[in-house]
Amino acid sequence: MKAVRAAFFASLALLPLAGLVTGARILYLLAAFEAFLLVVSAALGLWAILTFTFQQAVSAESTERGRPVRLALRVLNEKPFPYALLRLRLSTADPCEDRRVDLNLPPRSERSFDLVLECPHRGLYPIGITVIDFVDLFGLLRLPFDLRLLSWYRAPQLLVLPRAPDLPRLPLRTLDSKAAARRAAPSEDPLEPFSDLRAYRPGDSRRLIHWKASLRQRALLSRRFDPVEEPRLRILVDLAPPGGGREEAAQAEDALCEAAAAVLRHLLRQNRPVEVAAYGRTPVRFAARGPKDFPALRRWLATAAFDAPAPLDAQVAQETASLREARAFLVLTARPDGAGLAALRAIRDRLSVHALVAGPAQDDGRTREAAADLRRAGIPAWALRYGEDPADVLGAEP
């Protein structure tokens, strides 16, 4: 097609010159005919741009990384002239994918497509047609038209969430489970020490009722316990760019966010108070206490940009000033360095410090070696690579 197009435009330029040299009128006629074809092709292309209609819809507004979605695409030609060739360029949830659909449409017809789109990375993605290439019947002109230039065009948005598998256990030191266990399932043991009794209130767990005292008083009485201080956990999500190529960086970011999602889901299901801090270009801080807070944290992890201007040691130094109420400190990073290691070593004597190092699927052992360096420094650490199950890694002793 490119060779034919090049030959056509070359002849369109050379035929008038040849006519001037030879004086043959047929050459002028051929040049005029080619110019007429060019004008007709341009008119048909512009007409197609103005009359082209389509419908598109994504099967879900959000999905989990690794779960594909479907794009339903319908292209219509309601006019009496054919579309010789349409090339639809599609935006998908895979930034490295160049997805295209080629079709032609006879007059008053339509074509439907049901496309499966893979979701290899977390993020918020526009899904659907971005550019339409209109090619005329003779293959002379290709007119690209970017739909995103239209003020009314809005591509469907797809939110790809990080995976959040259930953790069988999370071996973090100094996390006392008394308060969380009492809130989740109060003891039925009447001999367990409690502070006093109070009148039963609607909504009190049956486990809190002191049955013997209730029989004596002829009224339901609930046990009241002294408040148990629940150790706080501070989680620092290091949003420094992981480095490496585009795909390697995306894999490391996915692994880190999935580790954070798994840890947060596990802790919040136990009603543990958790604080999450991240120092990107716009620092953020979240305080969460229960499962109802997890969806918002997961959506944030889906779209968090790894653009932190400060290295890990500077982030740890900022957190150190506000760690008075925290008993445990968990750092998740995809780019540890010697300065960050020294900063963590400096606070391990007064806090239970843990770390997780995330990396791409293929990293020549760098991720595991970084975690090993942390462990040699006395800091319990895990190594999680893209594609590995966070439940298998985080459930094991670091």
Image (cartoon, rainbow, N blue to C red):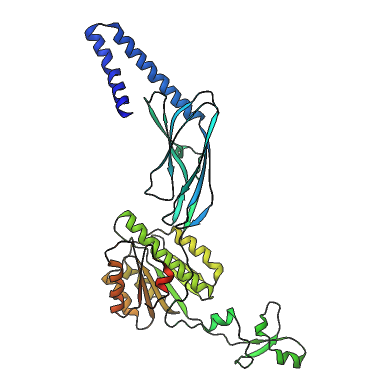
Q: Is residue 388 visible?
A: yes
- Which residue is at 38% across, 26% downward? 139
The answer to whether residue 343 is left or right of residue 77 is left
**In-front residue for pair 329/131:** 131
Q: Where 87 sits versus 285, above or below?
A: above
- x, y percent for residue 159: 49, 54
- x, y percent for residue 327: 43, 80
Q: Is residue 75 visible?
A: no
Residue reaching furthest to the left: 21
The answer to whether residue 373 is left or right of residue 319 is left
- Which residue is at 47% across, 48% downward? 116
- x, y percent for residue 302: 45, 59
- x, y percent for residue 367: 30, 67
The number of numbered badges drawn on the structure is 0
Residue 109 lies in quadrant: top right
Residue 18 lies in quadrant: top left
On-image quarter of the N terminus: top left
On-image quarter of the C terminus: bottom left
- Which residue is at 46% across, 66% downward? 261
The answer to whether residue 77 is left or right of residue 392 is right
Q: Where 102 sits versus 96, above or below?
A: above
